[in-house]
Amino acid sequence: MDTTKYIFVTGGVSSSLGKGIIAASLAKLLQARGFRVTIQKLDPYINVDPGTLNPYEHGECYVTDDGAETDLDLGHYERFLNVPTSQDNNVTTGRIYQSVIQKERKGEFLGKTVQVIPHITNEIKERVQMLGKSGNYDIVITEIGGTVGDIESLPYIESVRQLKWDLGKENTLVVHLTLIPYLSAAGELKTKPTQHSVKTLMESGIQADILVCRTEHELSDDLKRKLALFCNVETEAVIQSIDASTIYDVPNLMLEEGLDRVALKKLNLDAPGAPNLERWNEFLSRHKNPKDTVHIGLIGKYVELQDSYKSILESFIHAGAANELKVKVHSIHSEHITTENVAGKIEKLDGILVAPGFGERGIEGKIEAVRLARENGIPFLGICLGMQMAVIEYARNVLQLEGANSTEMNPDTAHPVIDLMEAQKSITDMGGTMRLGAWKCELTPDSIAHGVYGDSLIEERHRHRYEYNDNYRQALEDAGLKATGLNPDTGLVEIVELPAHPWYVGVQYHPEYKSTVANPHPLFVAFVAAAYRYASAKKDVSMA
Ligand code: GLN
């Protein structure tokens, strides 16, 4: 294709309508029709990236191969499309202003007064077109965070207006996601909030081309016609998005409603036949028809908010489907785990995952959970902080190194089995300074990891500051905790395993960021399989 087409997804009426899922579903359909598609998220907050945000604020921080700390919607984009994203796929107001201010300091504006229009909007427009100009994509979908009418999103909306004008009608499209609330007292679906949000968009000079209407009940043809008339869109461009039992149903629901067809028509692109969703639907059918259930404990300290562990939960869905199993994840707050109650909370589970995290809160509970999994042969996967807890647990309870700890939790520990890397010690800025993004890892032959990956050199994404302390490696290995994955350049330990245990793996990296529908992560697939073996063996024993 000669010209890149740009689709903007805006949101009205309320937040949390699932713009990311709609953007990813439309992208999936277009990709399944043979187009090269990417999705970008513009976030209106002032943080330069979400790396410094507490998970309670904004859910999980998702990390790309190139080490960008990004919004969790990028995780959906990758899981749906199976195409890696990068720094360019997530831009915040903070980053836009940082870049404009740096240019101002360098004198690049030649004495001009620097203003929101044109300087901030130009910077936004440049970031939107950067992906298109790479030549790698036919269609770029840009999701604008927030809700129209928010003060913070105004420069973005203005940039969309300008881009529609710059690039032409047939090259740009605005999809407005809105809510059609159901008033149970009146027994009616209400269109007024949508009319108002479309009007708000109009006040900024943008006519929505397509309305995607989130609803709990079917929209009648009459209601669609009414929306079309009052919102100035064609009836076929009023798309119903009814609540789905799984986000992975949304591409098919959008296909039934014709979202991709209408979008392509408006962009003047041919859409012959139907998208090829064969593999996607195979996954869905496995996901929806599990042969059995396996119970996994997710031990973390942000469990109150599901979004905090988004990629882990989605990885379990992919791995469950691969194993034709339903993975029931039991979230357990690590702060509530004690030596006395750990067995009661965990013993019945078929597998234990100790989650990533930062800071001291809840770590003793995590260490107890690791101990119980280790002593009872329960399949165990430790991710990042979870792997560090596994090393600490082994040092304390097997090597008898009393008070062994990470210097993140206790800078004065006598046994810093997890410690800050030399290069990290002088760093004072918190934002963007961790070990981030994809790093190579070489696997030991005959290890679990080697068997799982079927390869000896892998690349996985990182987001941490502290590392396995090599000074304790000999002692830990001699006592049975093997280092089975090393960074080939630095020698840093990336994976620990217990060969004497049925399935015990701790990884310093985050496998969950790379699991997709098309490529379920092999570690999660193997962990779920191990948990199922464990569950089946337990059943056999109890029946004997
Ligand atoms: N807090 C630990 C570190 O910085 C682990 C980070 C994580 O789990 N992502 O090393």
Image: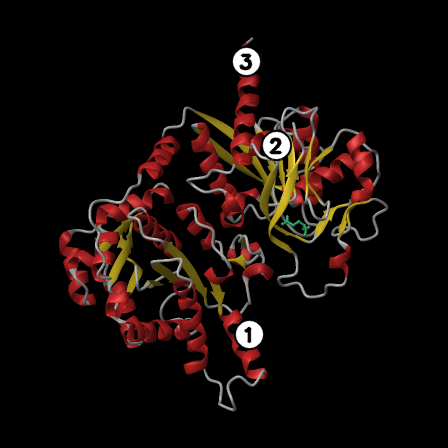
User: Is residue 386 placed above or below 206 in the rendered structure?
Assistant: above
Q: How far from the left and from the top, in percent, is residue 480?
A: 76, 29
Q: Circles 2 and 3: CB distance less than 8 Å?
A: no
**Quadrant in which residue 288 is drawn:** top left
Where is the C terminus found, in terms of image quarters?
top right
Query: As rendered, which of 268 and 342 lies closer to the eye?
Result: 268
Name the amino acid, label 3: Asp
Q: How far from the left and from the top, in percent, is residue 35?
A: 32, 52
Q: Is residue 103 visible?
A: yes
Q: Is mark 3 within 8 Å of ligand 1?
A: no
Q: Residues within 10 Å of mark 1 (few under 14, many from 20)?
A: some
Q: Residues within 10 Å of mark 2 (few under 14, many from 20)?
A: some
Q: Describe the element under mark 1 as helix, strand or loop.
A: helix
Indicate which disc residue 450 carries.
2
Query: As rendered, which of 426 and 452 lies closer to the eye?
Result: 452
Name the amino acid, label 2: His
Q: Which residue is mark 3?
A: 540
